[in-house]
Structures are given as structure tokens and as C-alpha cells.
Amino acid sequence: MTAAARKTNAVTMDESGVIAVMEQAIADAGVLVGFEAALIGDRDLAAVESGAANAPIVLGCSLVGRVLEADAESRAAGLEVGGRVVAASVQSCGTCEACAAGDEPRCEHALHRGQDIDGFWRDVNRIPASSLCPIAPTLDLATASHAGELALALRAADLAHVEGRRVAVFGSGPLAALAVATCVARGAVSAEGVEQIDRFSERGVAQPDARPDVIVNVSSAPRVVDQAIQAVAIGGTVATCAAPSEMTPRITDYTPNMQRRDVRLIGVSAPSRTNLRSSIELLEQGRIAPPLARSNPQFVSREYRGEMAALQDLVGRAQP
Amino acid sequence: MRQVGVAEILDLPEPAAPVAGEVTVATDMVSLGVSEMQAMKGNLLALWGETIDPDEPFVFGFAGVGRITEPGDSGLAAGERVLMSGVVSCGVCAQCRAGRDNLCPHLRMAGIHPTPAGFCRERAVLPCDRVFPVPDELSDEQACLAGEVASSLHLLRLGGVTDGTTLAVVGAGRHGRHAMRLAKLLGAIRVVAIDPDPVMHELALAAGADEAVASIDEVGERVGVVAHTAPGTESLVEALDICVPGGCVAGLGTPVTPNMPIERFYARVVKPERVIVGSRSKTKAEFRDALAFMAQAPERWQIPEAKHVPFADGADFLSGIVAAWPLAGEWYLEVTL
């Protein structure tokens, strides 16, 4: 790169929560990756909802891009100049037991892109080679941009042990749709997307035997955690993803609703690289098709400058 | 008990003769703990909206040890020493069929619920799947503890305690100390007891804890699992902070406040992928497993706090306890028939 090109445009959020495209310096270390597309996912919205604790910060927990510069190390990792890649959203220490087990989100030093540290929404990124996964050139941008959210859905399905169980997914948006598809792919007996959560909960009270064994909750409304605990079957599991940091759920009647029913509440934060690779494989094989991939209004292309209004609108809706 | 708060020795009709799948047991000893006291004071009855029918009196004794007198088709031998379980499940629902009888929607606790009758009586007839042979290594006194030990075992299993686990136990009461003893047998490499009462620290260390501290704030290195055995909403939520990422807080105790806010939910639960799990009672299989664990190291299940009372004095003793309730320190009674 020339000295003149050591700056890049980035989608940033400042201390006041204002989102804007700003010029930023490019870091020196890492593989140089050009931005091509990203999905505005639930974790991105949760990061914005959480306020600007780490502001100013570059937004974006996911990225599809092209390798612009590759050294010997990155080539050894299968990253060629011009090749398309997706990036892992968690930066971890790489040496602890969790990292060694391929479970980076559980690293004590895990940092989440776009939330704890700068994210990926900038024209040019420097990213550690270990955080990049190559994808097939045949995978279109819109589909590839769902890899991160699909990986999170896979993690939720695996942590909640959905195989052979009845599942409901509380919430809406791409992550919810992907979670339904993922749970089926992971062997759930049934998987139902639930947007009308109040109505679903009422049905559960009336028909206890019809309650799901697992509820994957992708809604950021605090009361939904409580509703999920009450709606899940005895001995069931509630897996909550992508919650904003300011959310304070209140578990009503903890003893009868949770303790005396062996109910399990688990947090799901971000996909590991193993989850991401599984997600890419599923997308490349066409085993899971992203919902509304081409027409999704939350899809961000390289022309994000022109879509700032839409982004601002999404963010506006996310704010409490 | 024909009315709340008044224990008495009654001459009740002999139990009906056992039918297929049932045995008759001559009771030698029963244990009575805090739950029975809560039942006697009427607190649990009020909670459940139940009353005592004077024609079908409340009989104490959730757990008891006795000898088989009529084995029927159980495969047990006459004279065999068995533990009787007061956990009564329907046996036909999906949970029972799956071996999760602790989650049976029709679950009742004999000797704690008004019906069915507990084991503080000379003879009991009960289904053979509620009696468990007592290993020779265990005394009657120790075997009577198996119900409590099984609850702690269920808690540890839900929490995922296994070989190499680091564990903190909130509350060094009876269930907490059973959890400490079991954790060591399950292969836990570090057990920290957390209790504000320094008197309990000695008991916790004797039960196998590697260290004992007064509060969650004093736990140094974080642990993989927290077994929460104390009442208190705040400590249940705060216990999340001493878990490693992916760690689990398994809760046995009943919080004082029914509604539990989880402040900093993202930082405490979602981001580190921690787990909170409620733990109810125990399964039949865990009764059996608890006896087997206890038999591995019977010397660990000493019960200095137990008070022993002959059957003839039991009613007066219980009435005295209720009048003086709440008592300082621990309370555990074994009645010898």
C-alpha cells in the first residue's frame, strides 16, 4: 500500500451514540482485507443498543471481504490475494485451554468485534490470519454475508443440545430464521419460529405437554427471557443470544418456574471459528439457504455510505 | 399429626397387605429435617394450599431405614436392610418413563406433603421401586441421609461436576456439605466453601472443602461450577461472577425473594456463556447412586449434629422443637423405632 492509502473510511459510533462514516488510519499488522459486504446482525444491533461504552468504535461484527495483500503465513493458511474470506467476530488469546479446544468465545480474554474492539465495517481492514476463513468463489456475497449469524445459530443449537428435541425460536430477523433452519439441520424433532411470543406463552400455559424442550431466544426484550423460562418444558433449556448489555431480565417466581423444573438458562455470545467453518460448509453445500438473502434490507454492501439512512433507521429502532 | 403443629403418637390401622410390586418394611429408623419442621409449622401446607385430614393423619418420615418383612415379587430378601424413599412419582408420565421422575408433574413427598404417609411408623407398605438395599458399609444413621445426599448429587450432575472440576459451594449447611463430599468422590480438584458463619467453615473443611471463605467476594481463582445451596436471590446471581466462561451455577436453595432480577445479564450470562440451572429433588436412580457413593467412603458421612430420639419420645420432642423454632445452628433428628 502507498502511504497515501493508509487511511480508510469506517462506520463508527461515538460517545453520544451517533453513527457516521469517518476516516481512520489502517493498522500495520494483519492480512489486508477489502470490505465487500456484511449483514447487520442481531449482535450489531445489540452493540448499538448497549450504548457507547467503548466508543468511539468501528461497528460491525461480521465481514465478507477480499484479501488484498497476503504474506507467507497467510498463504499457508489458505489465504490468497483476491480470495474471498469471512472474518471471525471474536479475538482471543490463542493460548488458553478454551482457545486450544477451538472454543474462543470462552477465552477469558475474548474481545468481541464491534463491541469491545473495533469492528469490520470499513473499506480496508487489517485482520489476523487466524481470524479469517476462506470461502468458495462460487458463494455469492449475499449468502456469504450470513455466515456469521448462521454460525451463531449453530452454536446456540449445539449448546442447547437440540437433537431429538422440540424447539421454538423466539424473536424475528435473519438470526431467528437461521436458528430455525439450523435446529432442524441439527436433528431437532421440530423447530418453530415464534414472533407472537405473548400468544405462544398463553398457549403453553393452556397446553403444558405442547411446550418446547428448547427455546432459542434471539429477542432483545428483557421480558422475553422470563417468558421463555415459563414457556419451556419441564427440564428444558433456554438459550439466549445477542442480548444488549443494558438488559436486566427478571425471572418471575424463580422457584416454581425454574428451580423446581430443572430449567436451564444458557448464554450464547458469539461463534467460534469451528462454528464459522461449519456455517460456511453448510452455505457452500446449499444445505441451509439464508432467508431473504438478496432482498434483506439489513444487508450492507460496499455502498454503505449510500445506505447510512437505512442503517440509522435500524439503529433508531434498536434504541430503547 | 391430625392438626398443624401438634405431633402425637397414634394407633393407626395396619397398612393394607402388599400387592404385586409392593413390599412391606419394618421401620428401624427415620430422619427428620428442616422440611419436616416446615411441614409441622404449616408453612408448606399453606404454600401448597393443602390441609390435613384428621381421619388420614400426616405421618412424618420422608426417609427411613428398615428391614423387608414381606418381599413379594420384588427380588429382595426377607430381612434385607433397605432405605425407603418418600419421593412418590406417577410412573407413567413422560418424565417418569424417561427416568426423570424428579420432574413428574404429580410428584409428592411422603412425610412432607400431608399424603401419602411417611415412614415414622412401625410398618410401611410401598412400591419396590421406592426401596433401595443399604450397603453393609453404611449404618442406619448414615443410610437415612441418602435422600439429602441424592439431592446434592442431582445438583452436582446438573452443574456438570466431573473429574477435574473446580467447584464452589454457596452455603455450608447439610446439602452444601454433602455436595462437597460428593464432589471429591466425583474427582473435583478444588472445592471452595462459601458461608458467612465461621462455625460452618470447620464443618465444611471436615467435609472435604479445600478452603472456606465468608463471601463470594473472597473467592480467588474462578471456578467451573457453583453449587448454590443457600437461600438468597442475590447470592445466586452474584455466584455467576465467580464462574469461568462457560461455567454453571446450579441452584438448589429457595431464594427468599420470588422475583430474581439478573443485573448485568449480558456481562454475567450471555457474553461468558454461563449457565444457570435449577435443581429439583432427585431421581430414583440417584437414591441408589447416593448410597453407592456413601459406601465408597462411609467415614466422610459422620453426622455429629444428629439428635437421636426413641420413638416413644418423638412426638413430645417434635412439639418442643416447633415451640422453640427457629433454632440456632443446624437441626437434624433421627428417630429410632
Image (cartoon, rainbow, N blue to C red):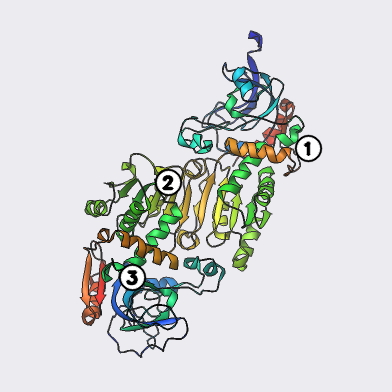
Chain for disc number 3: B
Question: In the rendered view of the protein, which quadrant contains the C terminus of chain B?
Answer: bottom left
Q: CA distance from mark 2 to mark 3?
A: 38 Å
Q: Residues within 10 Å of mark 1 (few under 14, many from 20)?
A: few
Whether residue A85 sits left or right of residue A115 in the image: it is right
Tag 1: amino acid: Arg
Q: What secondary structure is marked by label 1? A: loop
Chain for disc number 1: A
Identified at 51% across, 54% down, the residue is A264
- Return the residue at label 2: B240
Tag 3: amino acid: Val
Chain for disc number 2: B
Q: From the viewer's side, name the closer residue of B157 and A202.
A: B157
Q: What secondary structure is marked by label 3? A: loop
- Return the residue at label 3: B134
Specify the label residue B37 is tagged with.
Answer: none
Q: Earlier in the sequence, mark 2 or mark 3?
A: 3
Whether residue B234 sits left or right of residue A113 in the image: it is left
Tag 2: amino acid: Leu
Q: Residues within 10 Å of mark 3 (few under 14, many from 20)?
A: many
Q: CA distance from mark 1 to mark 3?
A: 67 Å
- Return the residue at label 1: A294
Q: Are marks 1 and 3 in contact (CB under 8 Å)?
A: no
Identified at 38% across, 50% down, the residue is B235
